[in-house]
Amino acid sequence: MLHHLSFAVRNPLHVAEVVAELWQGKVIPFPWHSDSFVALSFDPYGSAIEFFPKGTVLQPRSDDQPVQFSHADLTAANYSATHVNLAVPTSEAQIYAIAQREGWRAVRCNREGLFDLIEFWIENEIMLELLPPNLVEQYLTLVQPDNLKALFKLDATSP
């Protein structure tokens, strides 16, 4: 079960506000790193996304202390393989309206004929795969264990 993840973005507060709007949730300051914010969904799983200033990196310490935050210099737009697939209560029309308001790319896509989703590009650099109510059931049907085993031709006795 995934409960939270984090991204480094150019405008952490604004991005957290937009994601909270998509989730119909709330934003709080991230308590352990200044200028960072958390979008909370208030679902039963505690789903949250933390947004740090662009260039923030997490590093282990040499002792038994918790993670330390540091900053790397960045000069150009950065793309990443990191993304997240989110079910949102927001309608498809609302998603496009939010994207248009922000000047961010949003496009409905089909993944190999298996399911549809909306690619929503935070700051036109980080992709969220959004599943509004009209698209979520198709995805949930696909990812049921028996359906995944059939799709990937796995042994039916696999866990």
Image (tube, helix red, strand yellow):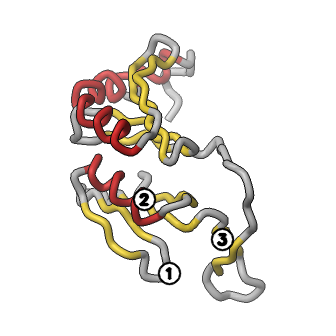
Q: Residues within 10 Å of mark 3 (few under 14, many from 20)?
A: few
Q: Amino acid at mark 1?
A: Ser
Q: Could you tell me if the residues under marks 1 and 3 are in contact, i.e. CB atoms within 8 Å? A: no
Residue placed most toward the observer, 78 or 58: 78
Q: Residues within 10 Å of mark 1 (few under 14, many from 20)?
A: few
Residue 52: image location, x then y, percent:
53, 67
Q: Residues within 10 Å of mark 2 (few under 14, many from 20)?
A: many
- Residue of label 3: 58
Residue at the image position 29 percent from the left and 25 percent from the top: 135
- In terms of sequence position, does the residue under pointer 1 or pointer 2 come before the other? 1
Viewer-side label of 1, 3: 1
Work out how far the residue at label 1 is from the one at label 2, CA to CA, in angstroms: 16 Å
Q: Amino acid at mark 3?
A: Leu
Residue at the image position 34 percent from the left and 52 percent from the top: 18
- Residue of label 1: 34
Residue at the image position 38 percent from the left and 76 percent from the top: 29
Residue 61 in sight here = yes
- Residue of label 2: 49
- In terms of sequence position, does the residue under pointer 1 or pointer 3 come before the other? 1
